[in-house]
Image (spheres, rainbow, N blue to C red):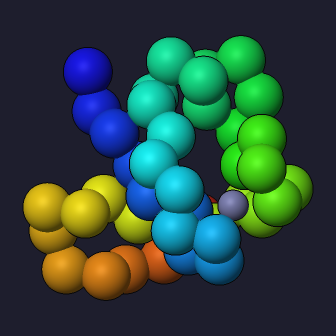
């Protein structure tokens, strides 16, 4: 399982949660990054 981190509130969110709704359940942000990799916004290219 992959864990993402919210770009704004810094909470960790599992991919399972994001599968249901790609939205931070804490602050409503839609920008996440993977803590293991470099900070990078997830954007559609
Ligand atoms: Zn958040």
- Tell me where residue 45 appears, x and y as whole percent: 53, 70
Q: Residue at x 37, y 80 (%)?
A: 40
Image-quarter location of ligand 1: bottom right
Residue 16 vertical placement versus 32 (above, below): above
Name the one closer to the observer, 13 or 42. 13
In this view of the protein, can residue 29 be seen by the observer?
yes
Q: Residue at x 44, y 58 (%)?
A: 5
Most extreme residue toward the left is 36
Residue 40 vertical placement versus 14 (above, below): below
Name the one closer to the observer, 44 or 20. 20
- Tell me where residue 17 appears, x and y as whole percent: 60, 24
Quadrant location, the N terminus: top left
In-image side of 44 versus 5 (left or right)? right
- Tell me where residue 28 appears, x and y as whole percent: 85, 56
In-image side of 1 versus 5 (left or right)? left
Q: Residue at x 41, y 65 (%)?
A: 33
Most extreme residue toward the right is 28
Name the one closer to the observer, 9 or 35. 9
Residue 43 vertical placement versus 14 (above, below): below
In this view of the protein, can residue 43 be seen by the observer?
no
Q: Residue at x 15, y 68 (%)?
A: 37
Residue 13 vertical placement versus 7 (above, below): above
Query: How many discs appear?
Result: 0
In-image side of 14 versus 38 (left or right)? right
Residue 3 falls in which quadrant of the image? top left
């Amino acid at each position: 399982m992959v864990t993402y981190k919210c770009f704004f509130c810094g909470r960790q969110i599992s991919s399972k949660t994001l599968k249901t709704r790609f939205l931070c359940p804490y602050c409503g942000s839609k920008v996440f990054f993977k803590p293991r990799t470099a900070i990078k916004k997830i954007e559609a290219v």
